């Protein structure tokens, strides 16, 4: 696996702008409505770390966060992007990483090994939405 760092973006605008003119960059409205998005940037120079850029709503489920990050890390694993990038099975392989990570985090949450501090990580809008659903 190539070395990588995780870069959390504070807003959907921030990650959208960081992606620049990337061909498969979704429209900002879609990113906001889905509530999360990530991409990995791969430096041309050997030895420099890849950067996994990500943003998610503050109340997004840890299972979905794990799924999103594992998908991107899957892109730079096992031979790195020069091996996988653009290959036919690349997205399927990254999705397999995502499924495994989601299963593990879901299991740890179910077992109580991992816990999520509910209120402290939720913003006002999320609390209002949760209140209106109850
Ligand atoms: Zn992908």
Image (cartoon, helix red, strand yellow):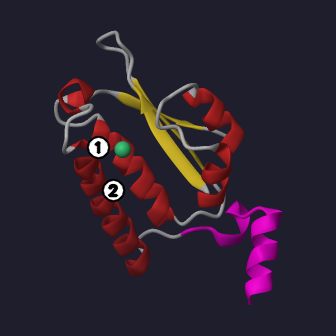
At mark 2, the secondary structure is helix
For the point 24% across and 42% down, which residue is it? 90
For the point 26% across and 28% down, which residue is it? 81
Which residue is nearer to you in this view: 9 or 15?
A: 15
- Label 1 CB less than 8 angstroms from ligand 1: yes
* Image coords of residue 120 (percent x, y): 72, 64
The residue stretch that appears in magenta: 116-134
Q: Eyeballing the image, is 51 above or below 36?
A: above
Residue 11 visible from this viewpoint: no
Report the disc number at residue 50: none
For the point 78% across and 72% down, which residue is it? 127
Q: CA distance from mark 1 to mark 2?
A: 8 Å
Report the disc number at residue 98: 2
The answer to whether residue 92 is left or right of residue 30 is left
At mark 1, the secondary structure is helix
Report the disc number at residue 74: 1
Residue 116 visible from this viewpoint: yes
* Image coords of residue 17 (percent x, y): 65, 30
């Amino acid at each position: 696996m190539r070395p990588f760092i995780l870069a959390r973006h504070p807003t959907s605008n921030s990650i959208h702008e960081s992606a620049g003119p990337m061909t498969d960059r979704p429209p900002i409205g879609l990113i906001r409505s889905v509530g999360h998005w990530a991409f990995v940037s791969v430096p041309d120079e050997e030895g420099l770390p890849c950067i996994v850029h990500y943003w998610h709503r503050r109340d997004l489920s840890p299972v979905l966060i794990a799924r999103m990050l594992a998908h991107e890390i899957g892109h730079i694993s096992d031979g790195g992007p020069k091996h996988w990038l653009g290959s036919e099975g690349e997205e399927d392989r990254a999705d397999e990483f995502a499924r495994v990570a989601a299963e593990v985090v879901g299991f740890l949450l179910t077992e109580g090994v991992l816990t999520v501090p509910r209120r402290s990580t939720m913003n006002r809008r999320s609390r209002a939405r949760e209140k209106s659903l109850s």
